Each structure stands twice: as C-alpha cells, then as structure tokens.
Amino acid sequence: MKRKLLILAAACVGLGVLGTGLFAAYWTWFLCAGDACPSVEQFDEYTPAQPARLYAADGRFIAEVGLERRSVVRLEQVPQHVRDAFVITEDKRFFRHHGVDYIRVLGSIKANILAGGLSEGFSTLTMQLARNIFPEQLPSRSKARNALQNILRKFREAKVAIALERRYSKERILELYLNQIPFGSGAYGVESAAQRYFGRPINELTVAEGAMLAALPKAPSRYNPRRFPDRAIQRRNTVLELMRREGALSDADASVAKAYPLRLNRPTRGGTGEIAPYFVEWVRAELVERFGKRAYEQGLRVMTSLDLDMQGAAERAMERQLRAVEAGTYGPYPHESYEAYLAKAASGTADGTGATSPYLQGSFVAIDPRTGAVRALVGGRDFDDSKFDRATRALRQPGSTFKPIVYATAIQTGRPPSYFLDDDPIEVPQLDGSLWSPQNYDGKFLGRVTMRQALYQSRNLPAIRLTMELGEGGVVEMAKHFGLTTRVPPFPSIALGSAEVYPLEMVASYATFANLGWRVPPTPILRVETLDGRLLYSAQPERVQVLGREEAWIMVDMMKDVLTRGSGTRVRSSGFTLPAAGKTGTTNEYTDVWFIGYTTDLVAGVWMGFDQPKRIKDNAQGGQLAAPAWAAFMREVYERKPAPPDWPRPFGIVSMAIDPVTGLRAGPACMSDSVRVEYFLPGTEPQGECTRTP
C-alpha cells in the first residue's frame, strides 16, 4: 500500500512537472507566436510621440499640432505628490512587485467571481505602459472580440511587463508611464495634461490639481472636469483620500486639498489652439506636406513668421468692421447678422457649416514684403463654427484690386502715368455673338482721362481699353509674374478682376510694389528644428524681379493717389497718415469688397463677402467697407513700431510739370492751377510744350 502511494505521488509530481513544462512552453511559444508579444528591446530607443510645437517670430508659444498633444518631461521634473497620486491610485504596490501584482490578481479573481463578471482588473502601471505603447499587439478590452482574447491579452501584458521590469528600473518605467498615459481632450502625458487643464507646467501644480490628473486615466471621458466638474471633483477627492490612507498626505493637507476649488484653464479651440487658429492649421498642412508623419511624432520646434500683436490687431480690426456693416453703419444691411446666427446656433436652429456659413465673412492677411513672412492671417470669423480658410483656400474675384497689374504692364511697356485713355461707352463682342457693355461704378463717363486718374478713381472702361490695347495675353503673363497661380483667361474682363484668385496670393502680389519691383513669395514658416536643436528647414525666399525699380516707384506714386484723392480716401479720413499706397476692389453685384494697401515694410489686405456669393448691400464699395478695417489695423500696428519711411525716388526718374489737358510739358503759355508734376521713365516724358492759353 505504501509503495502504491509513493508511486502515485511520483506520478503526480511528474504530471505537475510535465504540466509546468507544457505551460512554460505555451508561455514562451504559443502565447507569443509571431509578433503577438512586442520585444522590450524596442524600449531602449523608445521616445513617446510628441506634436510639433509652434512659436511666433518673437519666440512666444502659439500651439501644438499633432495626433497626440504631448510634452515629454523627466521624472525629476514631476513633483513627488503627483507621482504618489498616480502610484497609490493605479498601482500602490508598484515598487514591490516585478511587473505583475499577484496579490491584486487574486483579489481581482475573487471580486469577479462574486460579481459574476468582469468587475475589477489587475493591471499594474507596467502592464498599462505596455498596452499604451503597443496598442496593436496588446489591444484594450474594448477592442478584444471575445473573453478568450481578453485572457490572452492579459497574459501577454503580464509577460511583457515582467520583461520590462527585468530590463529597466522602476524610475524609468514610471517616467515612461507618466509621459504616455492618455488624459482625454487630446492630451497625453502629465505635462500636456497640466497645460491643457490648468495652463501651467506639471512642476507648478498643487496637490489637488495633481490628484485631479491622477483621477483621469481610469475613465478620461467620464471624469472630464470640463464636462462633468462635480463627478471629477468627487473622483479627485477619492484619490486624495487614498493618498491620506497610505500616508502620502497628512489629515490636514488632505482636508485642504479636498476643499480646493476646481480652477481650469480656458479650453483651446478646435484642437489647434486659440491663437490664430487659421494660421496654425495652414502651418500644420505645410508641415505635413514637407515632413509627413514626422510632423506629428518627433516634437519638431517650428518658428513661424506670426507676429502675435499684429494678429490680434487684424482680428480686432476685421471683426469690428464686419459688425459695423451688419449694424447698418454704412446703410441698410439686408441679411442676418453673425450675432443672430450665434443665437440660433445656441438654440440648435442654425444652418451652415464648413465653407458655407450664412453670415458675412472676411479674411485678413499681413505680410512683410521684404521677406515674405506672413505676420497675420485671419481666415474667417469663427474657427469653431467654420474651419474653412478664406485666406488661403477660397477663390474669389479680386475686382479692381487687379487693376494695378494692368497699369504695371502699361508702365513697363513705356506708357507714362499721363498717357490718355478713353472713358466712354464700349461694346465688346463675346464668343457667343453677344455684346458686353461694361459700366463704371457710378454709371458716368468722363471722356479723356490719364492713366493716373483712371487708376485712382478706379474707372472701369479705361482699364478695359488699356487691357485690349496691351493685349490680354501680356496682362495674363504679368499676373503670373506677380505670383497669381490661378487661371486668368485672356479676356478683356480680366481688367475688372473677373478671374478668381486666392486672397493670400492677391495680397502677396502687392509686395512687388512695396519692394520696388521685387516679388517675394509668402511663407508662414521661418525655421524647423528637431528636439535636440538640429536644423531641418530654413526659409530661403526666392526674390524675383518683376518690375524695374523706376517702374515700380511710378506705380507706387500712382497708387498713393488712391488714398489721397481716389476711391480709398477713407484710409486718410480714418486717421492713418503715414506714407502708404493701395487699391480698393469691388466685384459685380457688390458681392466682394477689398482693400489692399502697403507701406515700405508691411503689406495688408482685407476681403469681405459671403461664402456663397451674394450682394452684401446696395452700393457696397471696397473703399467704404474694407478700407476702414485696413486703416484701423495699420494705426494699431504703427503705434507699436517705428513709422515706415517713404519710398526714395530713384535717380533715373524724370519729373516734369504737365498740362493736364494736352499732356504736354507746361510752358509759360499754359500754366494754371491744374498743372501738376508728373513722373516719367527716361525717354517717355513729353517732348513738346503746351502753348495753349489757359
């Protein structure tokens, strides 16, 4: 009998050894067959994905762009009370186990049996880290298809966790965990969460705020402090109580922290940041085009061209003017206002999203003409309501802002500002056999006018005749030289800005005048660096000469008259008196209004209209509606920066007193009050002298 018992015992031991061996084989082979279990060696070079961080031209932070908002911090930068909050809440025996907390495993099994289902997990911090870093190989419970997959996932997590603990210190694992864990609202890692929710770095958080962060990983959406503040505070106080019980907080400190009010940072807009959201989105697209997915993962440092003060001035100037238009300041406004739309949106009855918002829209662009640096960009009134960027993506007719390109072509071909054009009725045959009979904005005809007068008064018929005289093809080529990339068909109507353009390109084209002939393409990015400071990209704008210095100076002088005695006089009457030039623009049926103007160091342009083109109001004019916004912007900008110098007259320019009736040099016989000084390229000045009697 005794012998039989010994044999039975030996058999049991053998079966146990065999079972253990089989389980070990399963553990090392079947469980991790293929790439089911990720290799922990990958952690040696692992760096959490970090978004690109955007900075203004003066170094101030603007926004982060990426799939995950994360800023990596070292463990020593994380306060002890924040570390304690996470360890005590998520894995209180973290520093005593080796990847798997077997005491917690047994407790979880008991709790689940009593509950009749999965009511309690046993993941350690190390297991959570493995799951967060390798979500494809170790999917979460919600992504598992059945109970067996969940069990296998847990085994794999445990195996990876044990391997991690053998290879790395507890401090390294905790550091990785705190930089990897998701906190909701697009924030990953404690530093990003601290900035997101409290507007301060992690090392400045109070005990209560640190506990609030530790409360979130359990269920970020359920305990979101912005949506469910009462629920979030209750969970935070639970964390504080756990810390008190474990001795990490005294009774007094715990009581004070529990009474601490929830003070959250203002939420960012649309995931891109409150500051210049349209500009940020434009930069994001540029980064992806240039660097691909690296833009979202490698924590690039992006120095942009944005001037935060100018950006604020542009937003204020445009919004104030749009509201003034809607309020009827410039005459009856027949449409629903933005404020009325917001009221409907609050009640759930508003319509219109994306690129079709129903209220009056606008865009504003400001550029340093010398470098092409975009200093301010506003793509619409409300990024949350409509993310469509009207500055860089909308195609709009430029109206009379296109006319300076026509006149620049004329100047380059030897026609002086005193060149006469006919402001008389005209009929232009069309391809379908019909006749096009364009009109001036005021319905009047002035007869014989100079190019200078035709430009500053924005007369349509002289511009059409000049385009036909120059040849439409020549004007189209000049438009390309000025940087317009959209198709400009060679028809006489292009003189009136009938061809659609991108507002950004139209504004940037005026840099050619401001630079006295040199075009510099617009750019939003100055420099891109890696986290360790290695330069990846530096803007090297290509300067292209479009006009001669003398030709451009004459155009500037002609366009100065737009502000002093032409269609843009509201700029001067609004109080902006520094040396500047520009052009108004209004399209057919008053659907678009523009003003683009410039000084020697700044080009800016305003567009206003509806996303689905329709009449803004009766007799809407760019000089009336858009120019005041430009003037307000420029006044604010030059309150902070030195006044710009005037354009120095090139040495080769010929100045001469001209009789306005004959266009000849004003001699003693025809001197009068109407005689004015005109400027000419050498060889284009009149050779004869006026002899008429005034």
Image (cartoon, rainbow, N blue to C red):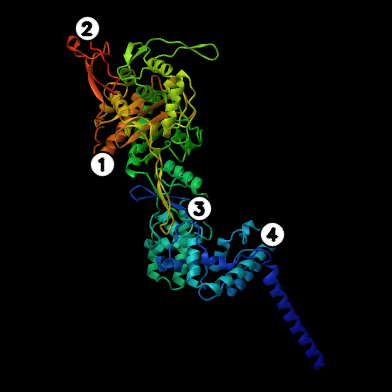
Q: Residue 653 placed where, x, y %?
A: 26, 26
Dot 2 or dot 4: first in sequence order is 4
Local crowd at mark 4 within 10 Å, few (<14), some, or many (≥20)? few
Q: Does the rendering let one see residue 682?
A: yes
Q: Furthest-top residue in view?
A: 693
Q: Furthest-bottom residue in view?
A: 2
- The C terminus appears in which quarter of the rendering? top left
The Cα–Cα distance between marks 1 and 4, rounded to whole angstroms, is 65 Å
Q: Helix or strand or loop: what does disc 3 sit on?
A: helix
- The amino acid marked with disc number 2 is Arg
Along the line of sight, the residue nearer the viewer: 461 or 269:
461
Residue drawn at the location 71% of the way across and 78% of the way down: 20
The part of the image, by quadrant, that contains residue 164 is: bottom right
The Cα–Cα distance between marks 3 and 1, rounded to whole angstroms, is 38 Å
Marks counted in the figure total: 4
- The amino acid marked with disc number 4 is Asn
Between tags 1 and 2, which lies in front? 2
Local crowd at mark 1 within 10 Å, few (<14), some, or many (≥20)? few
Residue drawn at the location 51% of the way across and 51% of the way down: 67
Q: Residue 582 placed where, x, y %?
A: 32, 28
Residue drawn at the location 74% of the way across and 79% of the way down: 18
Which residue corresponds to mark 3?
294
From this view, report whether residue 668 is shown above or below residue 154.
Answer: above
Along the line of sight, the residue nearer the viewer: 691 or 195:
691
Q: Which mark is residue 692?
A: 2
Dot 2 or dot 3: first in sequence order is 3
Q: Which mark is residue 146?
A: 4
Q: Furthest-left residue in view?
A: 668
Which residue corresponds to mark 1?
640
From this view, report whether residue 654 is shown above or below residue 47.
Answer: above
